[in-house]
């Protein structure tokens, strides 16, 4: 598998606090990479740097082999890196299709240059199509997002990544604050997205979920990378223990990757 | 069924209240239903409506504009002053509009660049606008017999209907179109709904806020020009009195159609309701202070229904 | 939501009851509409209330409409009264040039109009007023006379109102001819809702700055003079220390002129009550008794006399000067 994203020696400090202390990692095309670790391990900071929300203090980010500097989430988006935030960043009062197309509406030109007319019909159809691809059924594209269930809202947020034709989707705690059934639904969504040949980075506290959807896991601790492991035959309990002990033992594959 | 009924009431309750008021005056107030009186009401609410629509653009992006009334006065003085000094009406109109737009842009920059809350920033600009108006006029209104072409803007009639009514309709329809059918419109709505989400989605939210406040300034400028024309004079406080009534119209509008949110048809019905109330009370011979008391009650009642949007706009940076 | 609906309904019901009880409902035969520029101004309110009282004695129905100093509101008030088909309209302290559109609407509806202290308009029968130029001259000459045409004075001006502006200009003319009297400090009041505070601050500074150096004070209207009077009293000045002259008149003015502690020396009394009363009486004569306007008033103005009031002719409490 080709390398999609390459992070080299990322440092990030907030004043005297060192959040990331030289983390390097690779994301390969088509994988679902989970980033795990205790609170304060540096997961969120790392994600913010990749998504363009914050700049690294030092270190380099390569996308498809080219160094990139994301000044804003919009910058990252333009390069095909989409982030789905924990709070989903939706506008609840607005309609399903409007939310899916937020900031990237389909329009037609008018005689006034900056006044572009919304192509509501086209957007509505495309929105239904995206949701269909994720196997999610929302009958009314014009229903306000506020009327949807938690799982459906996740689907709307994830559809946005499809709309952006993102090649890399970053998901921040996608199953936090969801019930059992909705969690299953969201995990299914992630698999569907994966089937669409989208590469995914996921942050989660829920080991069950991580083991269920991820193909590879990176474990951070105190701003450093502890190691990496594959999820084959890995149980959630085992993963928890590795994080708690701060030791991956035999499962650590980091040395092998280095040799490659 | 009951849910449907409740939803209908939620969206159109206030409009039905306005209708009830209309019917009440039709029965109780002599001469109310005269076509000339109804046209009179439509004409009288035009300034109010145009200002209210502008204000709702600012509020759509979750910013308050408390300067629109005095900015309207400033535009009135600028346009009137140029006409008074024999400049061409076209130049005077353009200058009036520009004064309004400039004030709006300044409001926008103060809010987005200097990070001053709009509640405070626009109030400050309001004070500046008043100061400039008095500076220009020295406190004395420009008055005189002005060019007919200029006076037509505010006093003219087309097919027996005051031109002011057409201006209001054109602005209302165009605003509705911009907000509901265009990309800029939905970007402003997203900015107001969820600033952070909109920004993460790539919408230039700061620009949208500047735009919302600029439109408010521009409509205030237009109102000022219309006032100068209608009154054929330019008083440095000409539009000041519209502040509270225009805000009341918007607030009343926020209790209907899209409850809790500023919307053009709502503002229109809100202004119409206030206009009908004021006219009907006068026709019935009610004491003058009653209007003020009722206006205050309308504001309280409306805000109690749709408080969140206003509070957010008032107290967020 | 349901709660709020009920709340709204209750408010609406309250509003309905409220304005039904305050409705005069135009029961009588003759309806008079009074359009006032700003009821918040004491002189406007005095004129309107005197007119109202006179009209009620004649058995008329009266509606007073306030325009809150908003020119456009004067216009809409006039238009609404024309639509209400009232029998006559009285305009108090109007602005005929700016509100021409409203006056035209009334005259088109055939409603007779008289104005008070407004200036003239072709749509209005006549304007009842005092001659502001004369009033200004009386005040200025009284002040200079008391100073024996020499010394220093402070002035409190107001340029945003036509009447007070004229008074100030006439003072300037008088001073230009009498060079031994010098203005050593002047404050111009801003047109704001907090004008009282503005006057207080401005004059306080001038009084301190020029302590002991001035013998007279000129104020463009009485309510300004009251504020200055209070400042001077607080600083321990006694009647006679300083000559203070202003214009407008009224019960509070007379009280201060009589008051041995007050520094207000004199004021030109403008008969606001008499003007309001006269307007209604003349309206009655013309509209109901068939008198010809030309026989009652020649020209566009009916001038009433203003009267200089000082301690020698100030009326006792509750009474008005004998004109």
Image (cartoon, rainbow, N blue to C red):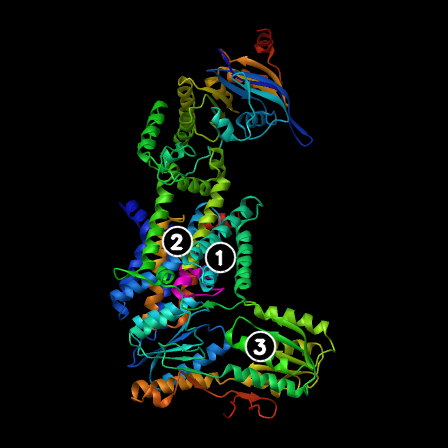
Looking at the rendered image, the disc whose residue lies closer to the viewer, 1 or 2, is 1
Segment tinted magenta in the rendering: B226-248
User: What x and y, as percent, mark residue A22?
Assistant: 64, 20
Q: Is residue B114 visible?
A: yes
Looking at the rendered image, the disc whose residue lies closer to the viewer, 3 or 2, is 3
Please report the residue visible at 36 percent of the width from the left and 36 percent of the height from the top: A109
Q: Are marks 3 and 1 in contact (CB under 8 Å)?
A: no
Judging by the rendered image, the residue that carries numbered circle 1 is B71
Depth order, front residue of C194/B290: C194
Q: Quick one: SS at disc 2?
A: helix
Judging by the rendered image, the residue that carries numbered circle 2 is C4
Q: What is the C-alpha distance between the residues marked 1 and 2?
A: 35 Å
Q: Chain of mark 1?
A: B
Q: Quick one: SS at disc 1?
A: helix
Q: What is the C-alpha distance between the residues marked 3 and 1?
A: 30 Å
Q: Chain of mark 3?
A: C
Label 3 CA crowd tier, 10 Å (few <14, some 14–19, many 20+) = many
Q: Is residue A146 left or right of residue A78?
A: left
Answer yes or no: are tags 3 and 2 on the same subunit: yes
User: Which label number is shown at residue C168?
Assistant: 3
């Amino acid at each position: 598998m080709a390398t999609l994203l390459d992070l080299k020696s990322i440092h990030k400090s907030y004043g005297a606090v060192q959040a990331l202390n030289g983390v390097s990692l690779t994301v390969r095309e088509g994988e679902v990479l989970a980033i795990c670790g205790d609170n304060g391990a540096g997961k969120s900071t790392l994600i913010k740097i990749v998504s363009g929300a914050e700049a690294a203090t030092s270190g380099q980010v390569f996308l498809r082999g080219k160094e990139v500097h994301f000044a804003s989430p919009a910058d990252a988006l333009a390069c095909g890196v989409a982030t789905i935030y924990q709070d989903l960043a939706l506008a609840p009062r607005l309609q399903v299709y409007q939310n899916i197309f937020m900031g990237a509406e389909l329009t037609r030109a008018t005689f006034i240059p900056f006044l572009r007319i919304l192509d509501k019909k086209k957007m509505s159809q495309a929105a239904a199509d995206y949701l269909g691809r994720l196997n999610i059924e929302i009958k009314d594209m014009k229903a306000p997002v506020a009327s949807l269930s938690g799982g459906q809202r996740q689907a709307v947020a994830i559809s946005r990544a499809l709309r952006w034709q993102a090649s890399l989707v970053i998901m921040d705690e996608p199953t936090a604050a969801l019930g059992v059934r909705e969690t299953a639904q969201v995990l299914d969504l992630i698999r569907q997205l994966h089937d669409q040949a989208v590469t995914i980075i996921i942050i989660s506290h829920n080991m069950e979920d991580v083991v269920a959807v991820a193909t590879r896991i990176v474990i951070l601790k105190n701003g450093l990378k502890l190691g990496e492991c594959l999820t084959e035959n890995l149980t959630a309990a085992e993963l928890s223990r590795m994080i708690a002990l701060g030791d991956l033992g035999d499962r650590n594959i980091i040395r092998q990757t280095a040799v490659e | 069924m009951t849910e449907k009924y409740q939803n209908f009431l939620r969206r159109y309750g206030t409009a039905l209240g306005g209708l009830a008021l209309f019917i009440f005056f039709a029965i109780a107030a002599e001469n109310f239903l005269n076509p000339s009186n109804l046209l009179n009401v439509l004409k009288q609410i035009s300034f109010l409506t145009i200002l209210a629509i502008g204000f709702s653009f600012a509020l759509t992006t979750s910013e308050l504009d408390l300067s629109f009334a005095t900015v309207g006065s400033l535009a009135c003085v600028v346009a009137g002053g140029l006409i008074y000094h024999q400049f061409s009406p076209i130049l005077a109109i353009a200058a009036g509009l520009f004064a309004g737009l400039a004030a709006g842009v300044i409001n926008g920059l103060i809010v987005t660049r200097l990070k001053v809350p709009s509640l405070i920033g626009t109030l400050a600009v309001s004070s500046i606008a008043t100061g400039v108006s008095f500076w220009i006029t020295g406190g004395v209104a420009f008055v005189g017999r002005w060019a007919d072409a200029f006076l037509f803007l505010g006093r003219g009639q087309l097919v027996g209907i005051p031109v002011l009514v057409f201006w209001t309709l054109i602005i209302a329809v165009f605003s509705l179109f911009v907000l509901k059918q265009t990309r800029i419109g939905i970007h402003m709505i997203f900015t107001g709904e969820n600033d952070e989400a909109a920004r993460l989605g790539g919408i230039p939210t700061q620009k949208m806020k500047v735009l919302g406040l600029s439109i408010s300034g521009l409509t205030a400028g237009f109102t000022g020009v219309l006032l100068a024309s209608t009154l054929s004079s330019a008083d440095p406080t000409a539009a000041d009195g519209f502040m509270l009534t225009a805000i009341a119209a918007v607030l009343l509008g926020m209790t209907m159609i899209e409850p809790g949110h500023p919307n053009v048809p709502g503002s229109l019905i809100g202004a119409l309701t206030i206009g009908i109330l004021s006219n009907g009370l006068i026709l019935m011979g009610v004491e003058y202070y009653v209007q003020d008391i009722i206006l205050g009650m309308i504001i309280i009642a409306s805000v109690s229904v749709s408080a969140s949007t206003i509070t957010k706009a008032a107290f967020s940076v | 939501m349901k709660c709020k609906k009920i709340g709204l309904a209750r408010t609406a019901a309250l509003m309905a009851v409220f304005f039904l009880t305050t409705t005069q409902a135009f029961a009588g035969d003759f309806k008079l509409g009074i359009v006032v520029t700003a009821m918040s101004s004491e002189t406007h309110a005095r004129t309107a209330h005197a007119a109202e009282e006179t009209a009620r004695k004649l058995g008329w129905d009266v509606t007073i409409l306030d325009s809150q100093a908003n020119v456009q509101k004067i216009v809409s008030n006039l238009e609404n009264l024309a639509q209400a088909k009232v029998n006559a309209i009285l305009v108090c302290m109007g602005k005929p040039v700016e509100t021409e559109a409203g006056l035209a609407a009334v005259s088109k509806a055939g409603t007779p109009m008289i104005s008070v202290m407004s200036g003239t308009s072709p749509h209005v029968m006549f304007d009842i007023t005092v001659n502001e130029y004369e009033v200004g001259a009386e005040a200025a000459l009284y002040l200079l006379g008391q100073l024996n045409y020499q010394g220093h004075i402070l002035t409190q001006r107001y340029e945003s109102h036509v009447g007070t502006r004229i008074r100030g200009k006439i003072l300037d003319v008088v001073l230009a001819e009498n060079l031994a009297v010098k203005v050593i400090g002047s404050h111009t009041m801003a047109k704001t809702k907090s004008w009282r505070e503005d006057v207080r601050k401005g004059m306080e500074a001038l009084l301190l700055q020029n302590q002991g150096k001035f013998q007279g004070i000129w104020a463009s209207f009485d309510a300004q003079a009251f504020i200055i009077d209070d400042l001077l009293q607080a600083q321990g000045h006694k009647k006679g220390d300083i000559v203070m002259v202003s214009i407008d008149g009224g019960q509070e003015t007379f009280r201060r002129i009589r008051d041995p502690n007050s520094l207000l020396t004199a004021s030109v009394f403008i008969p606001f009550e008499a003007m309001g009363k006269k307007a209604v009486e003349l309206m009655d004569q013309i509209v109901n008794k068939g008198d010809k306007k030309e026989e009652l008033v020649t020209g566009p103005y009916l001038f009433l006399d203003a009267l200089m009031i000082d301690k020698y002719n100030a009326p006792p409490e509750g009474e008005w000067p004998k004109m």
